[in-house]
Image (cartoon, coloured by chain):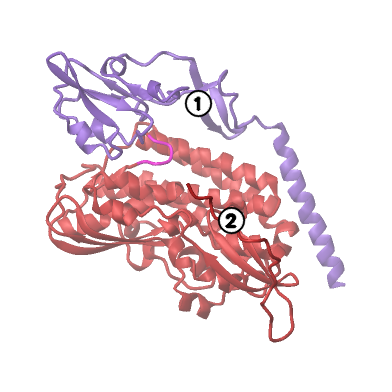
Amino acid sequence: MSAPPKPPPLTTVESTETSDSGAQTLTLSVGPQHSGSGHMRLIVEVDGDIIVNVAPDPGYVHRGIEKIIELRNIIKSIPVIERPSIIDASNLNHAWVRSIEEIQGVEVPRRGQYLRTLLNEMNRIMSHLYWLSIYGVFLGHTTMFMWPLGDRELFIDLAEKLTGARITYSYLVPGGVRRDLPPGFAEEAVKRTEYFEKRLKEYDRIFFNNPLFTSRAKGIGVLSREKAIELGCTGPTLRGSGVDADLRKDEPYAAYPELDFEISTRPDGDSFSRAMVHMDEMRESCKMIRQIVKKIPSGPIRRKAPIVLPRGVAYGRVESARGECSFYLIGEGGDKPYRARYITGSYRNMAAIPAVLLGNRLADMPTAWWSIDYWPVEADR
Amino acid sequence: MAPVIGKAKAAVDISIAYLTGIRHLFHRPYTLRFPQQRYAVEKGYRGRHLLHLDRCTGCGICAWICPEKCITIVPRGQRWYPQYFYGRCCFCHFCTDYCPEFALEETVEYDIAEYTRDRLVWSPERLSKPPVKKDDKYVFSVDTIGGASQVPQKEE
């Protein structure tokens, strides 16, 4: 038996990196297990405390969902598709069923479309509230961490009445939805959205008008209109830079063409603008929920759809809470897709991370970074 | 003059923020002390499954549609029944939807955590027992005066 090889002698490692200008920079690794980055790593190079270079390093929570989808039939894929962003589950699910219905040629009944829109808008509020609570705790505002998480319960409880589950609903299926409105839902929804709008005014008073927040957010992490378009941003990040782009208006789907709502844009493109776009969207979603429970037509909620995916190609896209979420789906006649390309809002907004962070101070990183509402699990898929 | 106005406005805004927070010290709390105070879910909640042994034909459609492969069809004498491994179940209840004989049903029992892994395997006999009645009485309520909180359910 031979002896194990000796370990190499310890030597001092000398830095060979030199900068041309003579300026000394320090490379920091923020994450992947850092409360300020989520499940991803940001490799940040600082000069003093000015950020001179940022490289996002995604992939820490990659689960290979596109491959998992190829191995399961189209119904079994629904819970998997919700997993990348369980706080925004129904919007991701909607993109999936839209692409399937496009291939199958199934038309969803109008009541089913309204119920889908109802859950999507409730989910948008829940997702934005989660974002807001993390934003509060990033900025050291503990009350703003507690309140939105508490108020999420208003809508989680409503969703539980509607779907039977609190977060991962698996509610949208090809052809329609799984359950009808329970009795007494409409009155409860109106009461809760009206209460929530009052709470949003309190959020304004305690956080968004508070100089402790505005002085840290205004003018920080500016993403110009041209830059946002060039980088291909979507969702609140794009609308926070003054671009009026929203799939709910541009390519109306489900019950959105029949609803009266406005798209919120802010011209400045800084962290404050992006935060206010989220707040405006929550107000609009409350209005939409009230319109839906008032206008919802009677009729069937689901039409029979085959479990087989015929030969064909489809591209289904929806406006999720973090931007455009889309599926490019190829069917080959079996119950499993040949290929499903899954692109989420966070993945599209990843390109904006260096753009908003460069030139800022390291202490401003949480403000600028989290205002993009980047959800690493959704981006890695 | 402008910096003075700016500072005065900042002072006013901060005072408003503090007052908004202090006002909520006197509101009812959102949270429950869980083991003593239990949240009551409504009928239709997707909790653990209830199996009707008399209706089940052992066809295995539930095991086929299960996305997490948590259902095994096990023999009991001449018949076959599903057995659930709740360590994997994601409570999507596609099995309940797809059961052609309506042998599966969702229950309001949500508190099924166990200390060991083998206790998470629910045999057909265990699944067929109706849920244990626990003292679940707190519900989430919103009213204009007290705000949102968990309150004891009204007796009917």
Q: What secondary structure is found at the residue carrying circle 1?
A: strand
Which portion, as a residue range, is magenta? A165-169
Q: Chain of mark 2?
A: A
Main secondary structure of the magenta stretch: loop
Q: Which chain is red?
A: A
| Shade of chain B as shown in the rendered figure | purple
Q: CA distance from mark 1 to mark 2?
A: 66 Å
Q: Taking the image as drawn, is residue A232 in sight?
A: yes
Residue at point 22%, 55% (across, down): A100
Quarter of the image holding residue A98?
A: bottom left
Number of marks drawn = 2
Tell whether position A177 is magenta: no
Q: What secondary structure is found at the residue carrying circle 2?
A: loop
Q: Is residue A73 left or right of residue A16?
A: left
Q: Is residue B63 left or right of residue A37?
A: left
Quarter of the image holding residue A210?
A: bottom right
Q: Is residue A304 left or right of residue A317?
A: left
Residue A188 in the image: x percent, y percent?
Answer: 45, 35
